[in-house]
Image: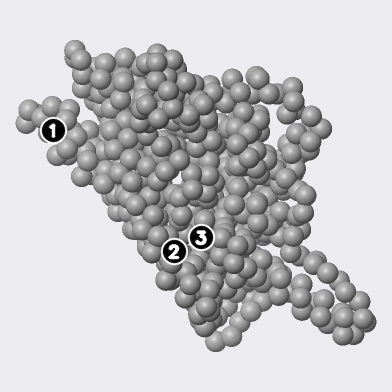
Amino acid sequence: MNALPHSQPLFAKGKIRLNGWQLSSTLIALLLAIPVVVIFSSIFVPLSSTWTHLRETVLSEYINNSLILALGVMLGTLLIGTATAWLTTMCRFPGRRIFEWALLLPLAMPAYIIAYTYTGILDFAGPVQTALREWMGWGYGDYWFPQIRSIGGAITMLSLVLYPYVYLLARASFLEQSVTVMEVSRSLGDGSWRAFRRVALPLARPAIVAGVSLALMETLADYGTVQYFGVSTFTTGIFRTWFGLGDATSASQLAALLLSFLFVLIVVEKYSRRRARYHHTSSSAYRPLAGYQLQGWRRWGATAACLLPLLLGFILPASQLSLWALETWQEMVNDDFYRLISNSLLLASATALLALSIALLLAYGLRIKRHPITSAAVQTAGLGYAIPGTVIAIGVIIPFAWIDNSIDGWMREQFNYSTGLLLSGTLFALIFGYLVRFLSVSLQTVESGLSKIRPNMDEAARSLGASSRTILFKIHLPLMRGSLLTALLLVFVDVMKELPATLVLRPFNFNTLAVRAFELASDERLADSSTAALMIIMAGLIPVLLLSYSISHSRKKLN
């Protein structure tokens, strides 16, 4: 019997043979990789006077502040995430079962929103300083109070919302470590701290490094927090160079320099994940092991250590936003607000569905036959999640503007008719930017779901004459319902929270909840921004609660 049409090689030359699935996967992946290629190609463009000006004035400040920010967040997330992961996994203290899942809640709080909230709480007219002046009888200039809008404040804000990356991966590693190893440690007289330092921490190092790497990627990609706090970093510098100095090429070269740092983190993170696969060292890994029963002040100290990041990273800012929303909702909830919700839902839903469809095509194309060209194209297209939205926006606008100008020039020459901007400043450009940024989230989730389906099921279906398309729709999709829903939710929420790419790529007079919250906060209308901010947080709680549910039902040995 002849092979079905869709499995025939559509592209063959020498040793290169791609079937229909692989060819379409490769073409789509290459299309989505264009912004990354455009950014890197800017390094071959001769340096302009703008770049010379940047190098002589602010480039060192961008580099220093970005490094200080990254180092501070690295230390903050490392300490908070690792310590709370160990306490909730291997120690017994009041509230442990609640903290197991609740410590993930700050992940639903975008960094720029928590920055607005703490500015309102801690500034001169805020409740903290006002109460302090009333209690102490102080006036203006009589006391010193730490400045929240500083690089130290930015480090604190980012650490409070990004530590769950380290917590999640470190806790998973602690749960998966061999019980036998821990029993040997106990038999040698090691207490909880000694066992953590000598046994658990070295074994969990790859997972912890992976979590810290993810937190650092988010830190270097942040725009809203550092811009609001007035901290000059690469992301704010890219905006200023592009919109302030009007030099897209120099902005692209700044972005290429930032990408170089990010790719180092990507390599470190991937290497750490590969090493983390080898930690299941015993068949007794999931045998019940009694945790360390903390006594006296230590048990309440552990409770306080877990409560503090949860309180500062979620409970306090969410409570303040709720109070502001109660004061302002009657003014802010109107037709314009409903339009913001509609715009945000439209973009998030469309992007999530498209990202899921493309991820299915790419992942299934690799499952049918892993070709080096297809694999390389898919990996390049999947880099977007590690790239700041500002950089993605530049990579989208430059080729789209070139296409628009080329079409407009040709139409003027041939028909004396101007087409204007067909791609730039449209919803298509915005959604394309979202796809480049968030495809990796959907792709990794779909690949994870596919990997759980045994290959012999595909072979059995093919032996009965089923085509690749039939196998996908009749076998794989029904078995992957959970993974597909997760992929949809994750991309949906990421789009709802995305700020810098939306600011640059959105059509004229088209706003989302994230943009509106940013604009109001930038105008110092912090209370007015609370309603939009709460809507974003509520959307972000969906995947976090799913993760929390999974955490609370993992490894029953600790219950």
Read off the residue under disc 2. Answer: 58
Amino acid type, callout 1:
Arg
Callout 3 environment at 10 Å: few (<14), some (14 to 19), or many (20+)?
A: many
343 sits to left or right of 380 = right
Q: Nearer the viewer, mark 2 or mark 3?
A: 2
The Cα atoms of the two marked residues, 1 and 3, are separated by: 45 Å
Instruction: State the image quarter where residue 505 is shown.
Output: bottom right
Tell me whether circle 2 and circle 3 mark residues in contact (CB < 8 Å): yes
**x%, y% of residue 488?**
62, 43
Amino acid type, callout 3:
Gly
Q: Earlier in the sequence, mark 2 or mark 1?
A: 2
- Residue beneath the point at 53% across and 41% down: 112
Read off the residue under disc 3. Answer: 237
Q: Nearer the viewer, mark 1 or mark 3?
A: 3
Q: Is residue 93 above or below residue 523?
A: above
Q: Earlier in the sequence, mark 2 or mark 3?
A: 2
**x%, y% of residue 236?**
52, 56
Read off the residue under disc 1. Answer: 194
Say whether residue 313 is visible. Answer: yes
Task: Tell me the quarter of the image containing the N terminus.
Answer: bottom right
The Cα atoms of the two marked residues, 2 and 3, are separated by: 8 Å
Q: Is residue 368 above or below residue 488?
A: below
The Cα atoms of the two marked residues, 2 and 1, are separated by: 46 Å
